Image: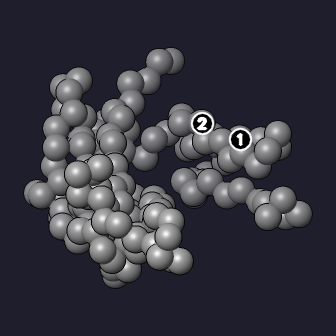
């Protein structure tokens, strides 16, 4: 069986910087150093959804647009347990934010058959999203990984 999966793209941006807009900063007054992030304007994250083989920018209509965001990290998780991925964004010098209930698309919104890998150095754990395997019951679609001594 061959499955077609849609690939969407979330881009986390930090600050708007260019050589022309560089802010001179120095710790000792003699040598240039990195400027503090609050000296630069933020840059919104961007969300592209795949539609008919092309990426479509849905940043504003999806609620992702936050002009002052300074994203440092992003995680995808079903925080509200509604079966849809949510996006948590950790920002620098700005409030963090959570984008809830981003919908998957038919026919496979649960990613049945997807392989998931968690890697720590050369140690790799694999899980597959499955359904219908236990007798007279349905398994949970959550994949769990253990890190033990690796964390």
Q: Tell me the tag on residue 126.
A: 1
Query: Which tag, 2 or 1, sits closer to the chain's start?
Result: 2
Q: Residue reaching furthest left? A: 61
Would residue 138 be visible to someone looking at this image? yes
| Occupied quadrant, residue 55 | top left
Circles 2 and 1, Cβ within 8 Å, touching? The answer is yes
Would residue 101 be visible to someone looking at this image? no
Pick whichever, 75 or 94, lies toward us.
94
Residue at left 38%, top 80%? Answer: 93
Q: Secondary structure at mark 1?
A: strand
Up/down of 46 relative to 126, above or below: below
Residue 58: % across, % down: 16, 49
Up/down of 70 relative to 12, above or below: below
Q: Measure how far apart labels 2 and 1 are at the Cα level.
A: 7 Å
Residue at left 36%, top 55%? Answer: 12
Q: Tell me the tag on residue 134.
A: none
Horizontal placement of 135 versus 40: left or right? right
Total labels: the figure holds 2
Horizontal placement of 104 versus 110: left or right? left
Q: Secondary structure at mark 2?
A: strand
Pick whichever, 42 or 108, lies toward us.
42
Residue 85: % across, % down: 39, 58
Mark 2, residues whose alpha carbon is within 10 Å: few (<14), some, or many (≥20)?
few
Residue at left 35%, top 66%? Answer: 24
Mark 1, residues whose alpha carbon is within 10 Å: few (<14), some, or many (≥20)?
few
Q: Residue reaching furthest top? A: 1
Pick whichever, 59 or 33, lies toward us.
33
């Amino acid at each position: 069986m061959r499955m077609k999966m849609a690939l969407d793209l979330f881009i986390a941006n930090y600050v708007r910087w260019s050589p022309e807009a560089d802010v001179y900063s120095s710790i000792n007054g003699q040598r240039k150093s990195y400027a503090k992030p609050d000296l630069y304007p933020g840059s919104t994250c961007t969300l592209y959804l795949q539609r008919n083989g092309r990426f479509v920018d849905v940043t504003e209509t999806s609620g992702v647009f936050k002009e002052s965001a300074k994203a440092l990290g992003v995680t995808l998780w079903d925080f509200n347990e509604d079966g849809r991925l949510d996006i948590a964004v950790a920002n620098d010098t700005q409030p963090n934010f959570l984008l809830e209930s981003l919908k998957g698309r038919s026919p496979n919104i649960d990613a049945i058959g997807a392989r998931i890998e968690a890697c720590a150095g050369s140690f790799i754990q694999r899980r597959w999203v499955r359904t219908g395997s236990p007798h007279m019951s349905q398994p949970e679609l959550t994949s769990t990984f253990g890190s033990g001594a690796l964390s």
